Amino acid sequence: MGLLALGEVLKTGDQSATPPTFFHRFTPNYFIELKAIQTWVVKYGTPTCDGISLGLYAMSSVFGSRVLIAQSDTSWQVSEVSSSNSAIKQLYFNFNNAILLRKDTEYAVSLLLDNYTGDDDNHIAWVRDWPNPVTPFAGSADLNSLNTYPFRFGIIGREVRP
């Protein structure tokens, strides 16, 4: 079997919500100087938007919500993902000013699609990292809990000591 990329279809209402409906939570176990975040998106059909960027949020334990603390300096156009009606692309979102992510603090990232129009037939989808669509996972319950925040993304930065 070749590449199989499953993504969460982002619809107009998901992106018009403040903050956007879909997000990925994470908690660093050491201090990180964040410079960029990479993720994968699928373009399906002909969605429209004025740009794709990425928001970094702090999770508020008091209010149980996300507070935007930074937006990427990089923005992508749908045409930069592909001119084809179906494609997958790894996108990098840079933060020109390094952001210090604190140890044991919960954060979240969301794709931000300005003036986005998307539906089942024409959309951007955020690629899921889990579960494996080819081989069901038969490991421990702890590892099954990875499915809680299933979007593929990676942090580009370095560990720092406060």
Image: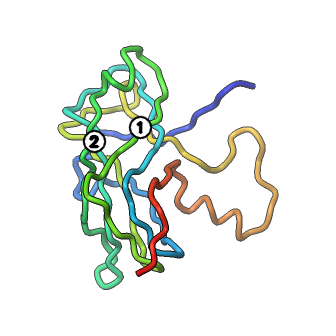
Tell me the kind of residue under disc 2.
Thr
Q: Point out the image quarter for the N terminus.
A: top right
The residue carrying pointer 2 sits among few (fewer than 14), some (14 to 19) or many (20 or more) residues within 10 Å by Cα, namely some
Q: Which residue matches tag 1?
A: 91
Q: Mark 2 and mark 1: span between their CA atoms?
A: 10 Å
The label on residue 3 is none
Say which residue appears at 64% left-offset and 66% top-offset. Answer: 145
Q: Name the residue under label 2.
A: 74
> In the image as oriented, which residue stretches furthest toward the top?
84
In depth, the one of 105 and 33 nearer the eye is 33
Using the rendered view, name the quadrant where residue 150 is placed. Answer: bottom right
Check disc 1 and report its element: helix, strand or loop. Answer: strand
Residue 69 image position (x, y, % from top left): 25, 65
Measured as percent of width and height from the top left, residue 123 is found at 37, 30
Q: Element under label 2?
A: loop
Q: Which residue lies furthest to the front in this view?
A: 161
In percent of the image, x 62 and y 50: which residue is there? Answer: 130
* Amino acid type shown at disc 1: Leu
Relative to 108, residue 35 above or below: above
Task: Indicate which disc, 2 or 1, sits on the residue closer to the N terminus.
Answer: 2
Residue 93 horizontal/vertical position (percent): 35, 45
In the foreground, 81 or 116: 81
Image location of residue 70, percent across then percent down: 25, 60
- CB-based contact (under 8 Å), mark 2 and mark 1: yes
Which colour style is shown?
rainbow
Vertical placement of 92 versus 89: above or below? below
Q: Quadrant of the C terminus?
A: bottom left
Q: With 70 as the anchor, is 86 left or right in this view?
A: right
